[in-house]
Amino acid sequence: MTQPRYTPLAQSLPASVPFVGPEAQERQRGAPFVARLGANENIFGPSPKAIAAMQASVAEIWKYGDPESHELRAALAAHHGISTDNVLVGEGIDGLLGYLVRLLIAEGDAVVTSLGAYPTFNYHVAGFGGVLHTVPYKDDHEDPYALFAKAAEVDAKLVYLANPDNPMGSWHSGADLLAALDQLPEGCLLLLDEAYIECAPEGTATPVDINDPRVIRTRTFSKAYGMAGARVGYVLGAAELIGAFNKVRNHFGMNRSAQIGALAALEDQDWLAEVVGRIGAARDRIGQIARDNGLVPLPSATNFVAIDCGHDGDFAKAVLDGLVARGIFVRMPFAAPQNRCIRISCGPDDQLDALAEALPLALADARAARPA
Amino acid sequence: MTQPRYTPLAQSLPASVPFVGPEAQERQRGAPFVARLGANENIFGPSPKAIAAMQASVAEIWKYGDPESHELRAALAAHHGISTDNVLVGEGIDGLLGYLVRLLIAEGDAVVTSLGAYPTFNYHVAGFGGVLHTVPYKDDHEDPYALFAKAAEVDAKLVYLANPDNPMGSWHSGADLLAALDQLPEGCLLLLDEAYIECAPEGTATPVDINDPRVIRTRTFSKAYGMAGARVGYVLGAAELIGAFNKVRNHFGMNRSAQIGALAALEDQDWLAEVVGRIGAARDRIGQIARDNGLVPLPSATNFVAIDCGHDGDFAKAVLDGLVARGIFVRMPFAAPQNRCIRISCGPDDQLDALAEALPLALADARAARPA
């Protein structure tokens, strides 16, 4: 009996995954993690009002969600002062990245990103046959001018930039990015990933005209809103581009309780402000823990802190392994030279206590294993 | 400023959607529906244990779901007596259909389905540039021999067959389908959609070897399990094909509460049996309501009943419009001659009372409007 006839592209793809989940690591370890600080989840959680709304909604989970996410979109439009035609809700930013890449990128089309930026974006580019070109970070910041110059050089249809950045936590002012847009080549769309924007200082969001066809922005309820497991992201952009998602998206892909929870979360901006304050305090504490161990925390506008371990990627990996072995789930950047760092998500004090306890031990192990 | 450069395929796609949601119709009507009997949702709902599990899980919605849905997959594997390598969980059957089409169908590749079968499958085929070929239903049943003969004729890589069928509710015995498989051409994969299988008589599931590379089956928690809004579907098939989904799927696409709820629902087979009984009783009552109005209900192995309105599609559409105008959300088949029917989902007595009240009025209107 013959095998299914895959497309040549599908056949060529590796079975690799962008991230291994902490649950898989726990299964491998045979023990749960003590602290879950690796996936930039928001352990402070969503608004109690969102939790209550989701719990109440479960009794009606027999209903499909509204395929238009109309109420949530209307609320988002009001929140951002735009039209509902400028916003579309999807199954997390990850799902929306896939749809956007599919709309623009056919086999052989050029795409640009930073070396070591979000792997799931790269996964989607590869998955649709795009050719990824990278530029290095500049002083641990994504470099818009280098990205746009590379885009011009390779005739890219799409360029990815996260502001604030993951995995480094660095950021540009929105005004600087708006100015840099002048260098974006004609016919190249900027995908501006603002997943962490709520954690960033005022003025970090790029004040681009919502109908500017050069830019599409991604936002999420997974980070500051504390609902990663709900899978609610959204895109903001020109109506024509936003409307194009309707050609390819999974129209009935949204969980109904997630739609209801996101609406309640959006309406509780007081809670958001409260959580952003806690995130800021946790960033400070992570920074202090790093310094207490002779390491350098990088400035962050996100819900995590990249800690420079002071040597190369192998050393940082040894530190990370030492933390994981002690039940602290953390991750680290994939590419040099950023992979001299480990990346610690913000969390409540008990989890940071566990980090503070484990880090010196992990560091000692890593230093002992280092070739003299 | 230039527009984004879409792929030629994306540019060619219509902005059409497979289904308009009932919420959009309610917004248009300016009033909620009295009865929600149009989307084959299961109004009897999920197991109370699943509801409790989902409610309890909301407090941890800040965590991403396990990208491997390991626990749910392990439970499904045990339930079906297969290996976890033979099952993969995704964002409803709709999402999984998209991934499967993407793995197999490139622009110009041939696909076969029945004329008037599941529109969302057709949507995905068009979305990846496939060329859809259709064969007619035979006595309101999908016709495996005609489907497979057409597949041989057009060298199809993929053929779709739902058993039981939607929108007609008809079914084949699993033994008959297994025998028909001999006619499936080499290199053509059968996508056997078993979304409604739990509602069907014993012997309807096709007893195909799980590692048979000719067949992949889709199952869901949206129908008999009553969790349409959760978005949990799964595919069953040969390990190599199941593994290929990992090349393209949205690994972090699953809602965490939905994973937990589906696991609890699967574990409560007593509730499932209870609901399947209620569905059977509701089918009988819908049949009686049809006959009370001089209409013919078709036999059904699903959670809905197709009612033959006795004339053409225009007449059935007039009946449907009359029901919708009276607050009864129902749908109907898209293609002739099945579109002489309207399709009524099972539901509790109060909703069927509303149907029983509205149907004679809708029929009278439709008959009055008919050309003599």
Image (spheres, coloured by chain):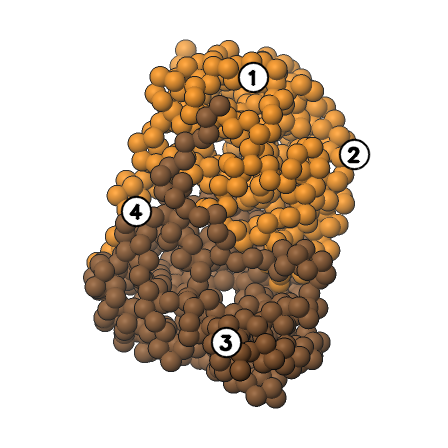
Chain colours: A brown, B orange
Element assignment for label 3: strand
Q: Nearer the viewer, residue B98 or B360?
A: B98
Say yes or no: labels 4 and 1 on the same chain.
no
**Badge 2 element:** helix
At 41% from the left and 66% from the top, the residue drawn is: A117
Residue that numbered label 3 is attached to: A341
The answer to whether dots 3 and 1 both sit on one chain is no
Q: Residue at x 47, y 76 (%)?
A: A312
Badge nearest the viewer, 3 or 1: 3
Q: Tell us which disc is closer to us: 1 or 2.
A: 1
Q: Is residue B227 above or below residue A120?
A: above
Farthest residue, direction front: A372
Label 4: how many residues lie within 10 Å, few (<14), some (14-19) or many (20+)?
A: some
Where is mark 1, residue-wise? Answer: B177
How far is the residue under mark 3 from the one under mark 4? 34 Å
Q: Residue at x 52, y 85 (%)?
A: A296
Question: Identity of the amino acid at label 2?
Answer: Asp
Proximity of marks 3 and 4: CB atoms separated by less than 8 Å: no
Q: Which residue is mark 4?
A: A107
Q: Are marks 1 and 2 in contact (CB under 8 Å)?
A: no
Secondary structure type for disc 1? helix
* Residue extending furthest toward the right: B270
Q: Is residue B231 above or below residue B257?
A: above
- Which of pointers 4 and 1 indicates the residue nearer the eye? 4
Amino acid type of the residue tagged 4 in the rendering: Glu
Disc 1 and disc 2 on one polypeptide chain: yes
Residue B270 - label: 2
Q: Amino acid at mark 3?
A: Cys
